[in-house]
Image: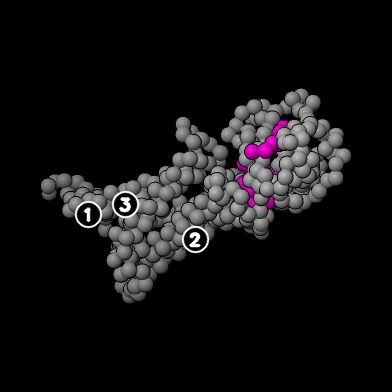
């Protein structure tokens, strides 16, 4: 037993203490809460449960831009905070014996679950904003499911550690470590600030000049808007779009060509497009209101719509548009972007643009609208 104990690493740093852990834990807890709640909003908007489909808000038009920008920003900040938090507590991972009682064993297992689930969430989220998927499972489903594990294990951890947290939450210390602790917290805060400053500009326009580390810079984009999924990836070409006509299904179904669509009364709106990777940008969109196209097919207001794309394959080749979006006067079948005809990568001949809606649901290369 003595040999085993002497073989374990020895940690003599004075800041591996509960006070430092609680101080950093407050910041980390706030980041996780913001990330979790904004992630729920994103999930509901992308996959609305049946009872909520008719209640989704289309205002403010920049709502998803704000919530998803906060989601990614708080997630990136949490990466720094998790590393700092683990630094303060990792000596206890080498404590001997590994557990002293059944209660202590359960406590350590819950911490292991919290750490594993949090690291999984942050790692997969980071890889997702880079649009790299080296795993065989669905990112969306796994990320959503593990988020609940993080939330549950965090609540359990807070309950178990409540006495310790309470003792050190506002404790004023005058020991020799106080200055070192303040320096450490200042360094962690500076690191969080640096990460935020160099990434949040992809969604927060005033900081766009500092957008050095984010995967998207909206200023470097075709027609002023970045492209996630290209026409080549969707296997859509100018040749395949040459004889394009929009099909609208309903009580009075019809087909309409691009020339006929262009001849209809057009509406020009300024709306942001915001993607799950955290980037967003405002743009001018011109096209025909979806509700006008549906009314011509005899589809009454308050009807959900299925939107089908020309793309050959993809998770979002077919999407559902709940009634609040279909009825909104700013939801367009867009034909022009920033006063130019849509490029093929931006969805030529026609695409959806709707207020307060995730970018993955702003379907490009639209070929059919029909009652859901």
The structure residue drawn at horizontal position 78% and vertical position 32%, both measured from the top left corner, is 254
Residue lying furthest top: 239
Residue on which disc 1 sits:
104
Is 354 in the magenta? yes
Residue on which disc 2 sits:
190
Which image quadrant is residue 306 in?
top right
Q: Which residues are magenta?
A: 353-372
Nearer the observer, disc 1 or disc 2? 1
Q: Residues within 10 Å of mark 3 (few under 14, many from 20)?
A: some
Q: Nearer the viewer, residue 255 or 172?
A: 255
Spatial separation of the CA atoms under disc 2 and disc 3? 27 Å
Q: Is residue 97 above or below residue 171?
A: above
Mark with earlier residue (2, 3): 3
The structure residue drawn at horizontal position 41% and vertical position 53%, both measured from the top left corner, is 151
Residue on which disc 3 sits:
111
Q: Nearer the viewer, residue 39 or 217?
A: 39
Inspect this view and state whether residue 143 appears: yes
């Amino acid at each position: 037993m003595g040999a085993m104990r002497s073989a374990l690493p020895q940690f003599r740093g004075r800041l591996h203490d509960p006070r430092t852990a609680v101080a950093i834990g407050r910041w980390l807890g706030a980041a996780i809460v913001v990330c979790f709640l904004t992630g729920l909003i994103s999930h509901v908007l992308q996959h609305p449960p049946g009872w909520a489909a008719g209640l989704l808000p289309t205002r403010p038009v920049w709502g998803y831009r704000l919530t998803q920008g906060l989601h990614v920003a708080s997630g990136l900040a949490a990466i720094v905070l998790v590393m700092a938090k683990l630094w303060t507590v990792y000596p206890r991972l080498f404590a001997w014996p590994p557990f002293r009682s059944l209660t202590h064993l359960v406590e350590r297992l819950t911490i292991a679950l919290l750490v594993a689930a949090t690291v999984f969430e942050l790692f997969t989220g980071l890889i997702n904003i880079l649009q790299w998927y080296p795993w065989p499972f669905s990112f969306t489903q796994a990320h959503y499911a593990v988020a609940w594990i993080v939330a549950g294990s965090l609540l359990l951890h807070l309950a178990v550690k409540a006495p310790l947290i309470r003792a050190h939450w506002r404790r004023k210390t005058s020991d020799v470590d106080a200055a070192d602790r303040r320096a450490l917290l200042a360094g962690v805060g500076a690191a969080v600030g640096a990460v935020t400053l160099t990434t949040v500009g992809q969604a927060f326009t005033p900081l766009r000049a500092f957008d050095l580390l984010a995967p998207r810079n909206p200023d470097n984009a075709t027609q002023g808007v970045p492209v996630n999924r290209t026409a080549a990836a969707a296997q859509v070409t100018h040749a395949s779009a040459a004889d394009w006509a929009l099909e609208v299904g309903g009580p009075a179904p019809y087909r309409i060509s691009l020339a006929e669509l262009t001849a209809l009364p057009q509406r020009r709106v300024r709306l942001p497009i915001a993607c799950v990777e955290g980037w967003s940008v405002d743009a001018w969109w011109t096209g025909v209101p979806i509700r006008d196209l549906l009314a011509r097919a005899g589809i009454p207001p308050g009807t959900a719509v299925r939107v089908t794309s020309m793309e050959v394959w993809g998770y979002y080749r077919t999407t559902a548009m709940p009634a609040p979006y279909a009825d909104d006067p700013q939801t367009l079948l867009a034909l022009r972007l920033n006063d130019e005809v849509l490029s093929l990568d931006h969805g030529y001949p026609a695409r959806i643009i709707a207020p307060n809606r995730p970018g993955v649901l702003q379907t490009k290369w639209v070929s059919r609208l029909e009652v859901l």
